[in-house]
Image (cartoon, rainbow, N blue to C red):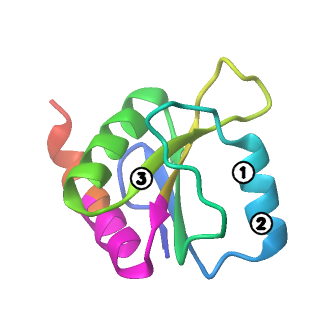
Amino acid sequence: MNTNNTPGVTIRLVKRPSKGFWAILESRRADSVHFEKYTHATDAVGLIQGQLGAILAASDIAEKAAAVQVAEIRGVCPTHMTLIAVYGDTSAVEAALKAVKEQLCTTLF
C-alpha cells in the first residue's frame, strides 16, 4: 500500500518482511523501554514517512486504532525523525494504516 494522498505523510505496507529488510529495520530502530523486542519478524510492518508533527500524530492514531507497536526509525541524522514503523500482524497493521489515512487529515486545523 502506498498512500500519497494523505496530508504530510507517505505510507507503505511490507507484508512478510524478508530477513534482509528485518535486519536493516531493526538496526535503525531507536531503542525504547516501551517497545517489546521481537525475536522474529512480525507478519507486517507499516512505514510512515513525513514531517515530525504528521508522523507523531500518525503514531498516536495507529496505536489507538489497532493492536500494533510503533517505533522511531533513525534516518541519516539521528536527531531528525522522519520515519516510524508500525509493527504487528497483517490485519492490525492494515487497520492502523487505514486509520492513519482516514484520520490524519482531520487532525489538521
Residue 10: % across, % down? 51, 55
Mark 2 neighbour density, 10 Å: few (under 14) some (14–19) many (20 or more): few
- The residue where tag 1 is placed is 26
Magenta-highlighted residues: 87-99
Q: Amino acid at mark 2?
A: Phe
- The kind of secondary structure the magenta stretch mainly shows is helix
* Residue at image coords 43%, 75%: 89
Relative to the observer, which residue lies in front, 86 or 12?
Answer: 86
8 within the magenta span: no
Q: Name the mark on residue 71.
A: none
Residue 29: % across, % down? 66, 42
Element at label 3: strand
Q: Amino acid at mark 1?
A: Glu
* Residue at image coords 38%, 28%: 53
Q: Amino acid at mark 3?
A: Gln
* Residue 101 location, quadrant: bottom left
